[in-house]
Image (cartoon, rainbow, N blue to C red):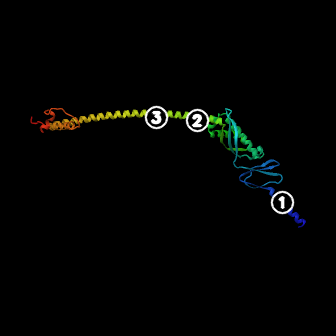
Amino acid sequence: MGAKGTSLLLIAVAAVVLLSMSVFIVDEREYAIKLRFGEIVRMDFEPGLHFKTPFVNTVRKFDNRVLTRNNPNEPFLTAEKKNLRVDFYVKWRIVDVGQYFRATGGDERLATSRLLEIMKDGLRAQFARQTVQEVVTADRAQVVDELMDTAGVTARELGIEIVDVRVKTLDLPPDVSESVFNRMRQERARVAAQLRAEGGETAERIRSDADRQRTIIIAEAQRDAQRIRGAGDARAAEVYAQAFEQDRDFYEFWRSMQAFRTSIGQGNDMLVIEPDGEFFRFLKDPTGGAGR
C-alpha cells in the first residue's frame, strides 16, 4: 500500500472516530445532559439518537427509574433517651436532572448519602418526641407521611423526589424490650378487663330485661287463663243448669255415677258410710226412688 492509501485509511479511521464521538444514544430509562466545558447547555433529550460536537461537548447520563437504598441498624434516641436500632429503606428518583447534577455533580453515591442524612434527621426528630412505647405502638403510615412531608422539601433541593419510606424493623435492648412488652401486656389486660366488665354489665341488663318480660308474660298468661277458666266455668254451670231443667232424674243419676267413679275403686281409699244413705240410692233402686 502506498503513502496515498495509508493517508486515505488514516482519514477514514479519523472520520469514524469523530463520527462515533459525535453520536450518542439516550435510552428511555435514562436522563441525559449535554455539557460544554462543565456547564450544562442542554438537558431535554428524548430517547433516541442525538449528536454533539466532539471534544467541546460531553454527555452525562443518569438513571430515571425508582432507586432503592437500604439503611440497616441505624441508632436513634427516644424521648426517654433509650437507644433504638432502626432498619429502614427509602425509594427515590431524579425529577430535575439539572438540579441533581448541580447539587451532587451527578454522583449517585453522594446523592444517596445526602438523602439518607435527610431521612435520618427526619426520623431522629420523630423518635425524639416519642417514648419507646409510643414508637412501638405508633401508626407507621402516619410516621411515614409526616417524614415524607418534611424530608421531601429538602430532597427537592437535590433534584430528587422521595417515592416511599418504610421502617422495616425496630430493635430494642433486652431490658427495654421486656419493659415495653410488660407495659403493653398490662395495657392489653386493662382493656380486656374493661371489655369484660362492659360485657358483664350488658349481659346483666339483658338478663334483667328478659326476667321482667318473662314475669309480665306469665302474669298476662295467668290473667288470660283465669278469665278463660272463669268463662268456661260459667258456661259449664249454664249447661248443667239447662240439663238439670230438661231432665232432673237423669241429671241426678249422671251426677251419682260421676261420684261413684271418683270415690270407689281408687286404690287404698276407704269409705265409711251408711248403706241406707242417699249416696247408694241408685244402687239399691235404678230409678233412684223416683216413685217416692
Q: Secondary structure under badge 2?
A: helix
How packed is label 1: few (under 14 Cα within 10 Å), some, or many (20 or more)? Answer: few
Q: Earlier in the sequence, mark 1 or mark 3?
A: 1
Q: Is residue 47 above or below residue 239?
A: below
Circles 1 and 2 in contact, beta carbons < 8 Å: no
Looking at the image, which residue sits at the far front?
A: 268
Left or right: 9 in relation to 228: right
How many numbered circles does the render carry? 3
Q: Earlier in the sequence, mark 1 or mark 2?
A: 1
| The N terminus lies in quadrant | bottom right
Instruction: Name the residue nearer the viewer: 170 or 15.
Output: 170
Q: Nearer the viewer, residue 171 or 153?
A: 171
In percent of width and height, residue 4 lies at 89, 65
Q: Closest to the observer: 132 or 116?
A: 132
Q: Give the residue drawn at x 41%, y 34%.
A: 210
Question: Could you tell me residue 213's position as x and y percent?
Answer: 39, 34
Q: Quadrant of residue 13?
A: bottom right
Kindly identify which residue carries mark 1.
15
| Amino acid of disc 1 | Ala
Q: Is residue 277 above or below residue 98?
A: above
Query: Which of the two marks, 3 or 2, is nearer to us in this view?
Result: 2
In which quarter of the view is residue 275 placed? Answer: top left
Residue 98 visible in the displayed image: no
- Cα separation, mark 3 vs mark 2, equals 26 Å
Badge 2 amino acid: Arg
Residue at position x 26%, y 36% in the image:
232
Callout in the foreground (1, 2): 2
Pick out the residue farthest to the left: 291
Residue behind mark 2: 185
Q: Give how far apart the Cα atoms at labels 1 and 3 are.
A: 95 Å
Q: Which mark is residue 291?
A: none
- Extreme-bottom residue of the structure: 1
